[in-house]
Image (cartoon, coloured by chain):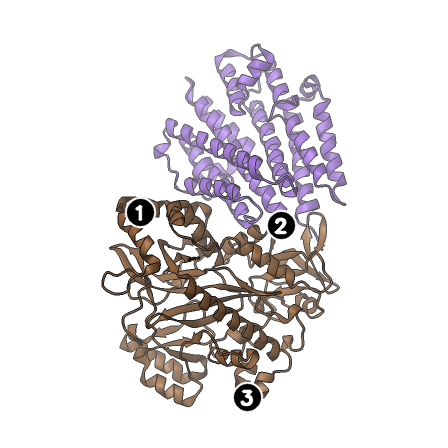
Chain colours: A brown, B purple
Amino acid sequence: MSATPYDEMHAGEGAVREHYETFASWLARTPAEDLDRKRAEADTLFHRVGITFTVYGEDAGTERLIPFDIVPRIIPPAEWQHLAAGLKQRVRALNAFIDDIYHSQQILQAGRIPAEQVLCNGQYRPEMQGIDVPGSIYAHIAGIDVVRAGAGEFYVLEDNLRVPSGVSYMIEGRRMMMRLFPELFALHSVAPVEHYPDLLLENLRSVAPPGVNDPTVVLLTPGAYNSAYFEHAFLAQQMGIELVEGQDLFVDDEFVYMRTTRGPQRVDVIYRRIDDDFLDPLVFRPDSMLGIPGLLAAYRAGRVTIANAIGTGVADDKSVYPYVPEMVRFYLGEEPLLANVPTFVLRRKDDLEYTLAHLHELVVKEVHGAGGYGMLIGPAASKEEIAAFRERIRRAPERYIAQPTLALSACPTFVESGIAPRHIDLRPFVLSGREVTLVPGGLTRVALREGSLVVNSSQGGGTKDTWVLER
Amino acid sequence: MLSRTADHLYWMARYTERAENLARMLDVNSRMSLLPQSAEVVEQGWIATLTIIGLLDAFRQHYDTVSSANVISFMAFDRDNPMSIYSCLRAARENARAVRGTLTSEIWETLNATWLEMRTARPSRFAAADVGDFFEWVKYRSHVARGVIQGTMLRDEAWHFTWLGTYLERADSTARILDVKYHLLLPHGEQVGGAADYYQWSALLHSVSAFEIYRRVYRDVITPRRVAELLMLRDDMPRSLRRCMSEVYMHLQAVRNSQSLETERRAGELHASLHFGRIESVFEMGLHEYLVRFLGRVRDLGDRVSRDFLVSAD
């Protein structure tokens, strides 16, 4: 793939892409002091609103601000239409896949995916086998990570089908931009994203257990010390639903109740932001203090909907990722609109040999890793790091996949030395219920360190507002 | 609403109110300490304050001398003292953070901003002017918090639990502030004796923002009996025991559940005794004895509220 990254704003020497022209001329005529002042204001506002995330490891329990960059990432209408269609298609196929896996497993019988790849995967939950869920929807909320590479084509880098986070930064980022630069929104017709919580609530209500007319929806959080707690509180508030912890819920006779000041109240839909492992200490990790004993029994009896469903990890595991285009063909009978990044599956002998010989030019990821932990970026790694990683791969090749180093697209970003291109990705949020919907946009993450390709907030990434233009 | 949510709201309000009342007590005493008087009198004033807050022993474990600087350092800025203004504002913010989904964003932002500012507050050498400004700031932030709650919060259960916390805390605090006089002015009976005494009673009125109110209501010299009447029995005095209990009773009625009737009855009984009580009988019983008994009943109500609503069983 090409070494020079695709620049979102510029088309070569000094030429500005059409959809960035209005912004570029605004930027050129706005005095630098004004921009500095606005950036400082953004910092103060984010602190006051308390948009923070908790850092694990170093200085545990501290809250840190995610850096916000004021140069928006702009997507022209035609590109978005293509992207949105591709995302909906992909999520439909993923839901069909999970439903199939927990029922008749036709795709395995057809030999389109090796059965042991799925059934021996740690994310496969035998407890889910044969359970019917409302609407056959499993991944109600999907965060699909998309990057642009080469000459600007989109690739899906990763599907997040368990508890994808980041949508609150999308909404708060937009609010911040509208507060700081109202004039920019007068100059552009930017598609709105702030109705996301409405769509989400509607979506959650649409998957309530059959026969429940006015479902009670709650958001289940691990608590105030979780890294994404801000988002949990934000979404619960925006949807007007209770933000509950495991201790607030209990199961009686296979119904789920929350403890209120007026006694127990029935709960019909749980939007959970807790991993499968912690949901029910009777079935999963017995030491979990976060979950609700008996929840799985209530779930199996069809008395409560859990969103996302238990066991969706079987479809977003990095070892299953290479087969998603095949799922689109198998379940929908369509050609995938969005491409996967070419992926070497190291449990395959050929792929393993190729990878070990080309470690210096590949990105190697642990199949169960998340958040940018435990990966090797070949071109940026030292000889020692590569040697150490080679050993780790040899010991357990099935735990890794490898991909070519993508020249992620870059977007102009404020850095210490002024404005410079930095690599970005995009996480749109796809909602599945009675229908499949998504708001135009998503969370754009930016790697603030020069040359860095890691955009995760835990690894020094920042965010940008994402503008989908309506014309 | 969730019992846990109600619990956090209740304590958010209590800690906010407590920080304000601490600022009021400390402010009055640090102003008093500037009057021309002997060092022992100043020391006595601080000892009385620490005694009614219940932290005299804890203070002595950390400091050898009872001076304005030491007490203010301990009661305002000490991070390890769970009853300092610093700790109260932190606790108010932590409780708010735990239920920020239930709060309006204005309420959360107000408490969070207060905490962020408190975290960096460091008056230089606790100069009198500086700490005065600091106490004003604490009161001001408490006013802002109440105003934002008043102005933005839905009148639902969350609202009632928030005010329940506020008024129980305030009732407790006003009673304690009055009780200081017992520790300070034991020998004096009815008469206000001497300039220092006058300043102490008027300082007490100032500490509950009641000096001008006293003048308007009584249009006369300051007497202990009337000060006590104003702060205990008057319904129109926003920080009086009667006003506080009237609010507590009202908010309790609004959140009534199947097990809270006895709590409601006790609150009503306490309110009625203030409503129909006369200041003469209070003094016959002895002001200190009366206040001690009142504090016990307020504590009992607090415990019962926790049991009835906040930590429910399955």
Q: Provide the chain ID for the residue under circle 3.
A: A
As drawn, the residue found furthest toward the front would be A471
Q: CA distance from mark 3 to mark 2?
A: 51 Å
Residues at marks 2 and 1 touching, judged by CB atoms closer than 8 Å: no
- Residue with the mark numbered 1: A35
**Of labels 2 and 1, the one closer to you:** 1
Mark 3 or mark 1: whose residue is earlier in sequence: 1
Q: CA distance from mark 2 to mark 1?
A: 44 Å
> Residue A111 got which mark?
3
- Residue with the mark numbered 2: B4
As drawn, the residue found furthest toward the bottom would be A349
Q: Quadrant of the C terminus of chain A?
A: bottom left
Along the viewing direction, whichever of A370 and A19 lies nearer the viewer? A19
Q: Provide the chain ID for the residue under circle 2.
A: B
Whether marks 2 and 1 lie on the same chain: no
Whether marks 3 and 2 lie on the same chain: no
Along the viewing direction, whichever of B203 and A295 lies nearer the viewer? A295
Along the viewing direction, whichever of A452 and B272 lies nearer the viewer? A452
Q: Residue at x 74, y 31 (%)?
A: B269
| Amino acid type, callout 3 | Gly
**Of labels 3 and 2, the one closer to you:** 3
Name the image quarter holding residue B295: top right
Find numbered disc 1 in the image and state the secondary structure of the residue it sits on: helix
Residues at marks 3 and 1 touching, judged by CB atoms closer than 8 Å: no
Q: Quadrant of the N terminus of chain A?
A: bottom left
Residues at marks 3 and 2 touching, judged by CB atoms closer than 8 Å: no
Check disc 2: other Cα within 10 Å, few if <14, some if 14-19, many if 20+. Answer: many
